[in-house]
Image: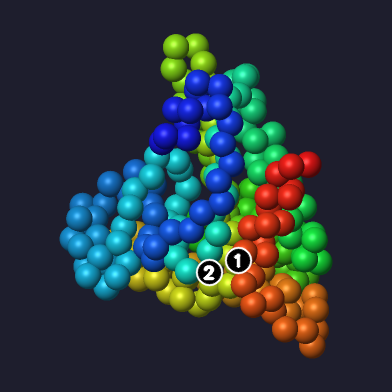
């Protein structure tokens, strides 16, 4: 949590980053008695399990995914500020994707992994498809507080693969949770729909990262 520590000292940070393949689950998953056994099996299959402090559900990581983390000092009660933090985060990504002719906004997407009101979703054929998930985590020290706002954006990752890995983990835990790949989309899929007959940019992730950087400067 280096970025949060720096934010508590008055320094704001914005980072676009990638992660190795794996699944990230909230600390609440410690409630499953077989978590250690399931985690070891997942590690052996090339999908290590990591736990995080923020809430929500299981989130896949890996190639084709960009993460955006914003850490900054914040005044006001977390409960009162949470929606504005999410709105700012979603706004940064929405502006970036709009430059690629992808329209999106916050919304629930039932049966997607780690569903929440502030998913970033794309309307398609009368339904919403999740293109990004968001989360936030707060820390307070010596009267100062800061927030870490995070988004996971599906750039050219395979929705089928991501959902399958998350479902394998949930099934092994016997959690009763199941996710549908059809609830997801990606920047690549949306680009193809918005630009029929045109080739997807060679390095789409770099293009998206550049647009996010430009959006942050607004």
**Helix, strand or loop for disc 1:** helix
Q: Which residue is at a point 42% across and 34% down the rendered structure image? A: 2
Q: Nearer the viewer, residue 36 or 214?
A: 214
Residue 125 position by quadrant? bottom right
Q: Percent from the top left, x then y, of residue 175?
A: 35, 59
Residue 142 makes an appearance in the image: yes
Q: Which residue is at a point 35% across and 71% down the rendered structure image? A: 168
Residue 145 position (above or below residue 20): above
Categorize mark 1 by other alpha carbons within 10 Å: few (<14), some (14-19), many (20+).
Answer: many
Categorize mark 2 by other alpha carbons within 10 Å: few (<14), some (14-19), many (20+).
Answer: some
Q: Please tell me the numbered disc located at residue 51.
A: none
Q: Percent from the top left, x then y, of residue 176?
A: 38, 62
The residue where tag 2 is placed is: 64
Q: Which residue is at a point 68% across and 57% down the rendered structure image? A: 210
The residue where tag 1 is placed is: 205
Real-space CA distance between mark 1 and mark 2, rounded to the nearest whole angstrom: 7 Å
**Cβ atoms at labels 1 and 2 below 8 Å apart:** yes
Instruction: Point out the residue furthest to the bottom here.
Output: 197
Of marks 1 and 2, which one's residue comes earlier in the chain? 2
The quadrant the N terminus occupies is: top left
Dot in front, 1 or 2: 1
Q: Percent from the top left, x then y, of residue 205?
A: 60, 66
Q: Nearer the viewer, residue 52 or 37?
A: 52
């Amino acid at each position: 949590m280096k970025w949060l520590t720096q934010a508590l000292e008055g320094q704001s940070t914005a980072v676009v980053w990638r992660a190795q393949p794996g699944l990230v689950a909230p600390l609440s998953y410690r409630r499953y008695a077989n978590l250690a056994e399931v985690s070891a099996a997942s590690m052996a299959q090339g999908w290590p399990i990591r736990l995080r402090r923020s809430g929500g559900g299981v989130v896949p990581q890996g190639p084709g995914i960009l993460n955006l983390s914003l850490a900054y000092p914040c005044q006001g009660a977390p409960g009162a500020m949470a929606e504005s933090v999410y709105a700012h985060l979603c706004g940064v990504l929405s502006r970036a994707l709009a430059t690629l002719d992808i329209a999106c906004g916050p919304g629930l997407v039932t049966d997607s992994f780690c569903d929440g009101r502030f998913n970033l979703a794309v309307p398609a054929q009368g339904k919403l498809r999740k293109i990004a998930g968001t989360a936030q985590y707060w820390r307070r020290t010596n009267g100062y507080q800061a927030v870490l706002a995070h988004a996971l954006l599906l750039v050219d990752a395979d929705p089928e693969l991501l959902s399958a890995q998350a479902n394998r983990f949930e099934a092994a835990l016997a959690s009763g949770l199941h996710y549908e790949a059809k609830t997801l989309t990606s920047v690549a899929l949306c680009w193809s729909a918005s630009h029929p007959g045109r080739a997807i940019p060679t390095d789409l992730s770099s293009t998206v990262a550049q647009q996010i950087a430009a959006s942050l400067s607004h």
